[in-house]
Amino acid sequence: MLVTRRLEFDAGHRIPDHKSQCRHLHGHRYALEVTLAGNIIEQAGDPANGMVMDFGEIKSLAQQHLVDHWDHSFLVYAGDTPVVEFLRTLPDHKTVVLDCIPTAENLAGQAFALLNAVYRDTYGNHLRLERVRLYETPNCWADAVRQ
């Protein structure tokens, strides 16, 4: 069985080598979909009885391990030296320095890597992360999927 929980957050970024508008500092209202696979829990009296995982718990874990860190931050590639140096001049600025260019594809991959260990078989129902879908805009997204 597959279940998906959607969360949203705001963040800025830039794509330094892009030939169009995306090379400029800008932001997005990102949407993140976390898709888990697992067996339906069948244990009378268990609050998760009939579920793969409670949607509230899916949200809470994604919020704690990813969204709270990326929300209202600037996601910047460590090799984008002028922007990294500029952001360091801003007092108390929320900056996330990444080892990759913050494209939708790379961010989806980073999110999958961060969340993969979070959603493990903690319920004995073979729970695992299957996909992270990251929407950069309502019409553009990238999927990182279990290989």
Image (cartoon, rainbow, N blue to C red):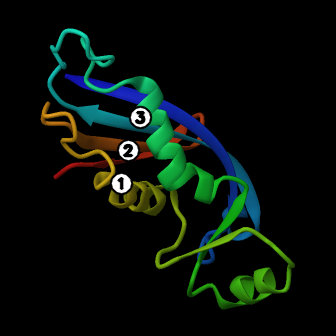
Q: Earlier in the sequence, mark 3 or mark 2?
A: 3
Q: Callout 1: helix, strand or loop? A: helix
Q: Earlier in the sequence, mark 1 or mark 2?
A: 1
| Relative image position of residue 38 (x, y in whole percent) | 18, 30
Q: Which residue reaches farthest front?
A: 45
The answer to whether 145 is drawn above or below residue 93 in the figure is above
The answer to whether 38 is drawn above or below residue 147 in the figure is above
Q: CA distance from mark 1 to mark 2?
A: 6 Å
Near mark 1 (Cα within 10 A), the count class, few <14, some 14-19 or many ≥20, is many
Residue type beneath disc 2 = Val
Comparing 109 with 119, the one in front is 119
* Quadrant placement of the N terminus: top left
The residue wearing badge 2 is 132
Residue 123 is marked as none
| Relative image position of residue 8 (x, y in whole percent) | 61, 38
Between label 1 and label 3, give the one nearer the viewer: 3
The residue wearing badge 3 is 58
